[in-house]
Amino acid sequence: MSLPKYHLYIEYAQDPEKSGIRFNLSEEELVRTFVNPYETGKPFWFCGRLLKPAKVEKTIIFWSFEDGSTIVLPNREMVAGHPNKKFVMEKICAGRVKGVNICTDKFLKNNTDTTTAKSK
């Protein structure tokens, strides 16, 4: 049985260039590179950029057994490389993407986002 792959979506305040999705993290890597610094208010690296937790507007952590490069939206478009990340996350959070599960609350204690999705 394979381990889940974690994927991290971040919307960054007033700078859409710094927003995005990071795919295929192990649980250890997710906690070490994002959760621990984010929860303690320390800057963290995301997609080659050093970000400040205070400027993060939205965070969604989700997992799948599939590699991020093979996850498909209901309209058959690929999640990875899709030009509209907000659209992708709307579909994922609505539970419309098979094999993907939201798990933000498992990792972030102070998460105020009430977005949830059901397993398909």
Image (spheres, helix red, strand yellow):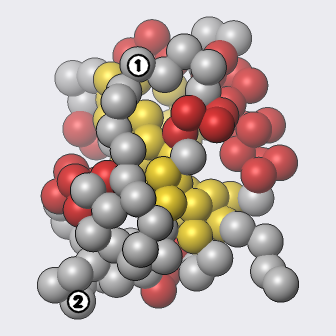
**x and y percentages locating residue 13 in the rendered image:** 28, 22
Decide: few, some or many residues near mark 1? Use Cα within 10 Å; few <14, some 14-19, many ≥20: few
Residue 69 visible in image: yes
- Quarter of the figure with residue 79: bottom left
Quadrant for the C terminus, please: bottom left
Residue depicted at 79% across the width and 80% down the height? 2
Element type at marker 2? loop
Residue type, mark 1 in image: Thr
Q: CA distance from mark 2 to mark 1?
A: 31 Å
Sequence-wise, the earlier of marks 2 and 1 is 2
Q: Are marks 2 and 1 in contact (CB under 8 Å)?
A: no
**x and y percentages locating residue 40 in the rendered image:** 69, 11
Q: Which residue is mark 1?
A: 112
Element type at marker 1? loop
Q: Which residue is mark 2?
A: 76
| Left or right: residue 6 compared with residue 85 | right
Using the image, determine if residue 83 lies above or below residue 74.
Answer: above
